[in-house]
Amino acid sequence: MTIEFASSARSSLGVEWELALVDTDSGDLRQVAQTVLDAVAPADGSQHPAIRQELLLNTVEVVSGVRTTVSDAMADLAAGTALVREVTDPLRVELMSAGTHPSAHWGNQKVTDKARYATLIDRTQWWGRQMLIYGVHVHVGIEDRDKVLPILNALLAYYPHLLALSASSPFWDGRDTGYASNRALLFQQLPTAGLPFTTIGTWAELEHYVGDMLHTGVIDEFDEIRWDLRPSPKFGTLEMRICDGISNALELGAIAALTHCLVEHLSRLIDAGEPLPSISPWFLAENKWRSARYGLEAIVILDEDGTEELVTDHLDRLLGTLAPVAADLGCVAELEGVRELIASGGSYRRQRAVAARHGGALDAVVAHLVAEFRAGRPLPVD
């Protein structure tokens, strides 16, 4: 089994933002993705390069081009979003992003008419039907294939930081789950989803794994490996898929900048011959659970000695470490948005505060998420 890794510029960047389509009046999900995709499709009938279909007809994904800076990627997403709005505004449909819709029922959603999605649902049944979730993916270019898996395994040490910052799915099917990110634990129920195997440390070992999965019919193509953090050979990138859907552009830019800086920081450690951070699989699994459960209140495990610290305290020091990298990558302002995100309390906290302020009414939570998306920043709870 041979997997070619495409050529890409070091620390090039791409961002993918999954958006829910919600009714302006009721706040419920609308199954109009195909209407949007048909309206924006080029004259030759191909898919629009910046607006893509997803598993469910209540979702579209807006993607950036290949960029060198976070600000350029965010400008692409703003342009893509504006194009979607040209179609959705007359339909009285709003855009929203969070790990889950607070109150929508999974059984009411329609699956996109595409063979790969039908196969997924047929195989995974009840769990597949419940994938009423939204996420953010950040691609960062890796110039040397031999760096990909070492950087992937090192980046897992920061898994809880990224999940805690993005956690935005406390509600599921109209109930408070008690988790900051219910999406993270729901998504891992799919075959090949969840944490990557840290025992895969070389490209040859990855090829062996993929060969086994293809031979036994677990997957039909590489993209069906749905790890939270995975190589993307066709783009020549490392793809960060840890995060919940993010409700506004300011916080999305902050998390994209943090991801961008972390990958470049780790690449520089390799260049300098310095050791990379590592964390045992059992600590990694616990960190994922803690950040999903507690979000920004999570106490995370930092190293093989079991050192623990509040995730926001460690983030404060990490931002200092990454400051020179941010300056080189041109994302100082965006990275500073991480501090603003922490100060705002995180989306899961704001959602709960809105629900409490409105006597548990989750339509108010949807309205707040819609307002944050339009505002492009976190909003105070009225």
Image (cartoon, rainbow, N blue to C red):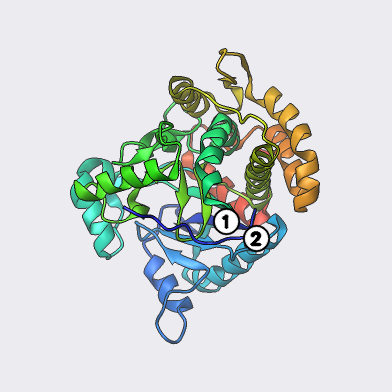
- Relative to the observer, which residue lies in front, 309 or 223? 223
C-alpha distance separating marks 2 and 1: 7 Å
Describe residue 159's horizontal placement relative to residue 191 as left or right: right
Residue at x 61%, y 13% (from the top left corner)? 307
User: x%, y% of residue 47?
Assistant: 43, 74
Q: What element carries label 2?
A: helix
Q: Are marks 2 and 1 in contact (CB under 8 Å)?
A: yes
Q: Which amino acid does label 1 sit on?
A: Val
Residue at x 22%, y 44% (from the top left corner)? 124
User: x%, y% of residue 316?
Assistant: 74, 28
Describe residue 139's horizontal placement relative to residue 273 as left or right: left
Residue at x 40%, y 55% (from the top left corner)? 29
Residue that numbered label 1 is attached to: 15
Dot 2 crowding, Cα within 10 Å, few <14, some 14–19, many 20+: many
Q: Which amino acid does label 2 sit on?
A: Ala
Visible residue check, residue 158: yes
Q: Earlier in the sequence, mark 2 or mark 1?
A: 1
Describe residue 348's horizontal placement relative to residue 53 as left or right: right
Residue that numbered label 2 is attached to: 73
User: x%, y% of residue 98?
Assistant: 51, 45
Describe residue 140's horizontal placement relative to residue 115 as left or right: right
- Relative to the observer, which residue lies in front, 195 or 352? 195
Visible residue check, residue 382: no
User: Where does the C terminus fall, quadrant-wise?
Assistant: top right
